[in-house]
């Protein structure tokens, strides 16, 4: 059961000599939540932007494996990937999976997508803001305004619009998880605008965590390193794709299934004492923050 955020301390005044004895404590620490290991998200209603493929697909499937019903928001061009993910969840894990087409760079499409999902699910227990785009350029002077606006609209503005629309269907114990990037912490010379949005996501996550603390809604994030997703061959030339991830400490890109457990952790009771934090699944790179 999710803990609330009480305004008063839970413990009474008391004292012991070190190292202390647990049987004397009042109240006693809670040491076994009694929840099923396999169904950490049983009957939870979850939304994942970009859930058709890549990290979003792996997260959607991991959530379903733990008993959740999932809605994935995707572009019209991604319908084949979205249908594969939905059918995989329905067939293998026997959970609901809604597919909702929306261009989240547009505010009204964000709101309409949440409205459609809420009509079916009635409530939202977990929101994963995950979808992103990137347009590499070697020099800042080469960044086109249209791409700049698109990057900010999809990567960070959409998080505001979707969260605003979703909050009315979320209650105490709900969880919001935002996907940032290792580039938020160490930058990227050819992804200036993308890195800027990922840095904004870190600040957004921490600020939203503080904003929603009294409502008992936790807000955390995952900051991936190089991960093998459709965005990579869709972004970089073939030679760079073949070298992708080789500069990480582990000398390889991560697989999306290696990231999904971090999202399950942040969505579930396991992380009930965490908010405003990021998990760095980045192949061993040490970053500040």
Image: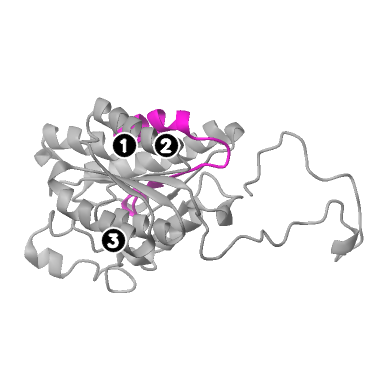
Relative depth, front residue between 57 and 227: 57
Residue range corresponding to the magenta coloring: 158-184
Asked if the magenta segment contains residue 167, the reply would be yes
Point out the tag, 3 or 1, that comes first from the N-terminus: 3
Using the image, determine if residue 85 lies above or below residue 214.
below
**Do the CB atoms of the residues marked 2 and 1 lie less than 8 Å apart?**
yes
Q: Residue at x 7, y 64 (%)?
A: 238
Residue 193 x, y percent position in the rendering? 23, 41
**Do the CB atoms of the residues marked 3 and 2 lie less than 8 Å apart?**
no
Residue that carries the numbered disc 3 in the rendered image: 88
Asked if the magenta segment contains residue 198, the reply would be no
SS category of the residue bearing label 1: helix
On residue 76, the disc is: none
Point out the tag, 3 or 2, that comes first from the N-terminus: 3
Relative depth, front residue between 170 and 150: 170
Using the image, determine if residue 235 lies above or below residue 207.
below
Q: Residue at x 29, y 56 (%)?
A: 57
Q: Residue at x 21, y 48 (%)?
A: 191
Point out the tag, 2 or 1, that comes first from the N-terminus: 1
**Residue 136 appears anywhere in the view:** no
Residue neighbourhood size for the residue with mark 1, other residues' Cα within 10 Å, grouped as few (<14), some (14–19), many (≥20): many
Where, by quadrant of the figure, is residue 255 drawn?
bottom left
Residue that carries the numbered disc 2 in the rendered image: 204
SS category of the residue bearing label 3: helix
Please state if 34 lies on the left or on the right of 241 as rendered. Answer: right
Please state if 34 lies on the left or on the right of 146 as rendered. Answer: right
Residue that carries the numbered disc 1 in the rendered image: 156
Residue neighbourhood size for the residue with mark 3, other residues' Cα within 10 Å, grouped as few (<14), some (14–19), many (≥20): some
């Amino acid at each position: 059961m999710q803990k609330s955020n009480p305004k008063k301390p839970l413990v009474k005044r008391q004292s012991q000599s070190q190292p202390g004895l647990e049987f004397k404590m009042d109240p006693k620490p809670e040491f076994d939540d009694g929840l099923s290991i396999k169904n950490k998200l049983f009957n939870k209603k979850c939304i994942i932007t970009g859930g058709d493929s890549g990290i979003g697909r792996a997260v959607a499937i991991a959530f379903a494996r733990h008993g959740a019903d999932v809605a994935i928001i995707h572009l019209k061009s991604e319908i084949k990937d979205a249908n594969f993910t939905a059918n995989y969840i329905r067939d293998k894990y026997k959970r609901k999976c809604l597919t909702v087409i929306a261009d989240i760079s547009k505010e009204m499409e964000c709101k309409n997508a949440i409205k459609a999902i809420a009509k079916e699910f009635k409530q939202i227990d977990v929101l994963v803001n995950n979808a992103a785009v990137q347009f590499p350029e070697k020099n800042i002077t080469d960044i086109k305004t249209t791409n700049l606006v698109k990057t900010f609209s999809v990567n960070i503005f959409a998080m505001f619009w979707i969260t605003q629309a979703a909050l009315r269907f979320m209650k105490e114990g709900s969880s919001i998880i935002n996907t940032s990037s290792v580039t938020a912490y160490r930058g990227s010379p050819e992804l200036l605008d993308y890195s800027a949005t990922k840095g904004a996501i870190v600040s957004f996550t921490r600020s939203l965590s503080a904003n929603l603390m009294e409502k008992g809604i936790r807000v955390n994030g995952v900051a991936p390193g190089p991960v093998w997703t459709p965005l990579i061959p869709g972004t970089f030339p073939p030679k760079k794709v073949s070298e992708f991830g080789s500069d990480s400490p582990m000398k390889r890109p991560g697989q999306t299934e290696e990231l999904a457990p971090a999202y399950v952790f942040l969505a579930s009771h396991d992380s009930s004492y965490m908010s405003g934090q990021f998990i760095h699944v980045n192949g061993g790179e040490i970053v500040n923050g």
